[in-house]
Amino acid sequence: MPGFNRKGILVLALIAVLALLAVPLGAQDMEETEFIIAHPGPIRTLDAPVTWFISTHWLANLLYDCLIWRTVDGSGYVGQAAESWENVDDTTWRFNLRPGNTFHNGEPLDAAAVKWNIDRVRTREDFMVQPQWVDVAEVIVVDETTVDIKTVGPTPYFEFIVSFNGCELLPPGYVEEVGDEAFSRAPIGSGPYVLSEFTESDRYVFEAWDDYWGGRPEIDRVIYQVIPEQSAQLAALLAGQVDMVSNVPAVELPGLEAAEDIVLTKETAAVMQHIYLRVDTTAGNMAETYPDFEPATLDLNVRQAISHAIDRDLLAEVHGAAVPRLGRICPHFPEGGADSFNNPETVTAHYDPDLARSLLADAGYADGGPTVYFDTPTVSRGGNEKEVAEVVSAMLEEVGFDVELNVLDPAAFGEQINSPGNNRDMMMVTLGCSVPLVPLFYRCVWPAAHHDVCVEEWDEVSNAILSEMNSETRLELWGQWWDYWFGVLQNVTLYEVQANIAYSSDFDFTPRKDGWYTFRENLKLAGDDM
Amino acid sequence: MSAGPGQPPATLPSEEDVATLVTGHSRQPSLLSLLRRSPIGLIGTGIISLVIVLAVISPLIVPHDPIRGNLRTRYKPPGFTADDGATHLLGTDQLGRDIFSRILVGSRVSVLVGVVAVMIAGTIGVLYGLTSGFLGGRVDGVMMRICDAMLSIPFVIRVVAISGIVGPGLVTLILILGLSGWVTYARVIRGEVLKARENDYVMAAWSIGQRPLWVVLHHILPNVIASAIVLAALQVGITMLAESSLSFLGLGVKPPTVTWGIQLADGKSVINSAWWMTTYPGIAITITVLGVVFLGDWLRDSLDPNVRGRD
Amino acid sequence: MQQFIATRIFQGLITLIIVSFLAFFLVRLKGDPVDITAPPTFNEDQKQRLRELWGFDKPLAEQYVIFVTRAVTGDFGIAYLSKRPAMELVIERLGATWLLAGVASLIGLSVALPLGIISSLNRNSFFDLGSTMLASIGTAMPSFWLGLMMIIFFSVRLRLLPAFGARDPSAIIMPSLTMGVGMAAYLSRLTRSAMLEVLNEDYVRTAYSKGLITRTVVFRHAMKNALIPIMTVFGLQLGWLLGGSVVVESVFSWPGLGRLMIDSIGVRDNTVVQAALLFFSLSFISINIVIDILYAVIDPRIRFD
């Protein structure tokens, strides 16, 4: 028996040693500049149009060019594959492509390639991003470097759509030759970087491309390293093994401030945290599934009481990196109410527990109650959802509510929120705050099961906004839109989420206003005056 | 009387000897006197009694409200004294709640979950293993394949599936942990039974025609229970940690209920700076486990027919 | 003996079929993958088309038959999100998972056996007390805590070891230690108990009285008999480790099966979950077969019926 044991152990040890030797050593050339960002993962595919997961698009953005792209400061658009573009008439957008531009494999990036790409995303119904492209009626190749895109109707926010998910241009010849599946394993684009290595579970390595139309990028290699645990990400940064961590918990900031070679910065994550309130029981199959459930939030007084009972300044403090807000568009956009509803003083003044109590009394709950069911994910895109929900519950109970808080894992929460008609009054939801998408969500034709509000007049305003080409008239329409928003009060906005970013002082970095961690002209070597 | 309970016979026992073995309980030293002679048992009993007493009286002795914290004093280190003079011995958590108070109150559900789940798992597992090992043959084959099937479905999947059928809550939590832990015991006990049933004294009991149930309970069980007790003692700690990962998945008890596991989960992402949030609940679990392990050692010794009474 | 092994393998296959059945229905108990993965812009029609594309519109029984007939040829379908064969995703992680499991259980065994044996030979000594305390701490210490503390010490303070990944050969040190500690704690207690049990049995004491020296007694007689429970638990633990540990893999960013499984459950990617489950159960079933055979090898009195 002892003999057997020893032999067994020996064999195992041998296997272990051999396996260790088989693991390739990470070759690192000190001459080249390498930038490693910690990414929570998983990143499942780089065939960009397929997925809806934002973080995949961050990486995709290094690899692919779009026609045009949002500027770093979020104020406008900049040409990528298109050198210039114009709005020819209400329904026609003309893009002038860069002459002689090619994909990484040498395939020409011409008008035909653009047409092929846009036709692909707008017709492939299995693509997650397809619904975003339904406004495109036709793509016309004018000449080799000119392409016209016709929209179904006037589409003022077309630039947003054409630079949003699914905009990535793929080489048609290569995709058709190898097929979708093989392409997603060895993707090719026309962006500043080429993908040199990817292991879904480990890391994604991008190498600078010499022939990029804008010149070879300054950083030779960009690596997205999958590190799932937030604490481990920070440790890796402190150990000098990664160069950037994109979402630092506020409590960790003092420790990082002390570190000499780490720079801290803060930028909007371009999402807002809301509490979704149930305003209707007819949505989905709720009437059949829960015939006896009558959400207390059906009463506008109750919804207003909830909004006034919440001390958003305190919530922002609990969250650690947030700015209190009332309306769901980020105020760095003209539509975002920087001087009105999203102004810090207005938000602070909105907190009025006495008003909340009297609203509850008006609703018939003078002696306490009502009971509200409140769902939250443990953590999601907004960060710290569970803690914030706990504090919100305490605030609501302060004015008389009886809160049944239900903490779910993100997947279960996702099911809960997407399943048609569940028996909940309130749910924590994180929503993007970019202008052009917002009105979409409040139209009567909107599909989501729980977006069950349909106010005819509001619908008309939303539709008008989405087809008004004159920006001043559009801003006036937005004024009306916000009246409905606050009048219906389906979403109680809490705060705009910000991200604390920590990165190595070897680099010079400008965070993007859209919350994307993608690196082009916004990342340079420190001390470089380019 | 050549063969006392502490000394298995060197040769095949006579009918008399077996009878003595079987009925010899009255001459065993009482548990209490055993405890007096065993320092380890004494320490274990001391720790566990302390934990239980603290758990019971915790609402009366907590220095601060364990549920409502002061949001202005979040993530404060151990020994922090607030403006109003309130001192937080072990610091505060992400909502400004006193860690010490939460550990005290958290002991109630944590210990309950740990102990009850382990008892459920242990009881099912031991009975299952006994039956399987003793009956042997085809029944054993089928029963063990059921075990294999159980083991082949990872904990996470089982949890997700169970929570899909019943909603989260304390009972669900105990059931999940209890019903997924029994297979270890079953396999260990069954292996031991296979071995024990070939032992001389079991053969002897067989040979004099004792009823199977009697043989199992009086000859096999005492010889195999030691491993189960050792497993169970360690399993208490593992169960408490599993409760932590369940509450992190949102499948544990609901807030405002406090458990050590929830505290661990809360502090997980801020270990770099707010180390006290995870360290102290971790120490609480460790001390409890130590108590249970000591107690288990002593219990194991006092139940093991070979070891008993020889100290 | 050969017949026993053949029977056991046959039984193993049947178990595998049962598991495939359970796995198939368990992953479908909770939730519609389309509800989770589809973007909010999808309406019911589009979701329905996605269901048809992924085959969820068919009756469950039919889906199961399709799943099994394809699975026997090694085809577990294309992962919904990765658009890669599910099997490929699993195989990509097997190497790292098995390496970690192997090294961790080696550490576990090589610590647990000496610790448990010495403890049992010196019962109630300070060594015994010390190892009891160590074992208690070992099982009660959350592995994410231990893991992060190691990262902070070895990677941040000393700058010695990589904090993540499996690229550098030294990267395995911390994750395998983290996993090994829990295993060592558990096994050492069991070894001690099992040793105590046999040390007090008659034949061991007979061996003593024959004047055989202690070490020989311990190894020849006692160890052999104490092995049964130790082996059982070791087998179970190795089985779990082969399935990957979500916590350790997350803390050390180790590219293993545990994370793949939990990530796939998160998006209800059933193809990947099923493929991973199959490997998980395969490793469990084969380990248990080996253990059952070893039972008989160690103690020939245990019959093969």
Image (spheres, rainbow, N blue to C red):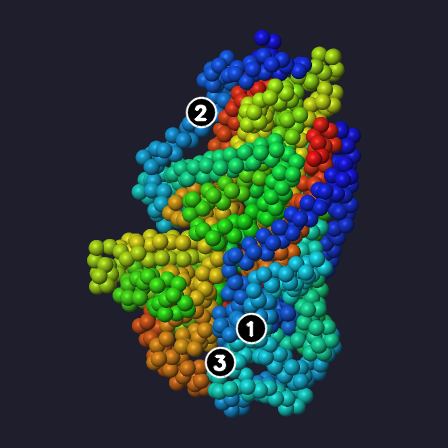
Report whether C282 appears left or right of B56: right
Q: Are marks 1 and 2 in contact (CB under 8 Å)?
A: no
Q: Amino acid at mark 1?
A: Arg
Chain under disc 2:
B
Chain under disc 1:
C
Q: Quadrant of the C terminus of chain A?
A: bottom right
Height in image: A45 above or below A137? Answer: above
Query: Residue A359 at what x, y percent from top left?
Result: 24, 63
Chain under disc 3:
A
Query: Which residue in the protein does label 3 denote?
Result: A157
Residue drawn at the location 33% of the way across and 37% of the way down: B59
Nearest the eye: C107 or C206: C206
For marks 3 and 1, give the CA distance.
28 Å
Q: Which labelled disc corresponds to residue C49?
A: 1
Task: Assign a secondary structure to mark 3.
Answer: loop
Q: Nearer the viewer, mark 3 or mark 1?
A: 1
Query: Residue A386 at what x, y percent from top left?
Result: 43, 54
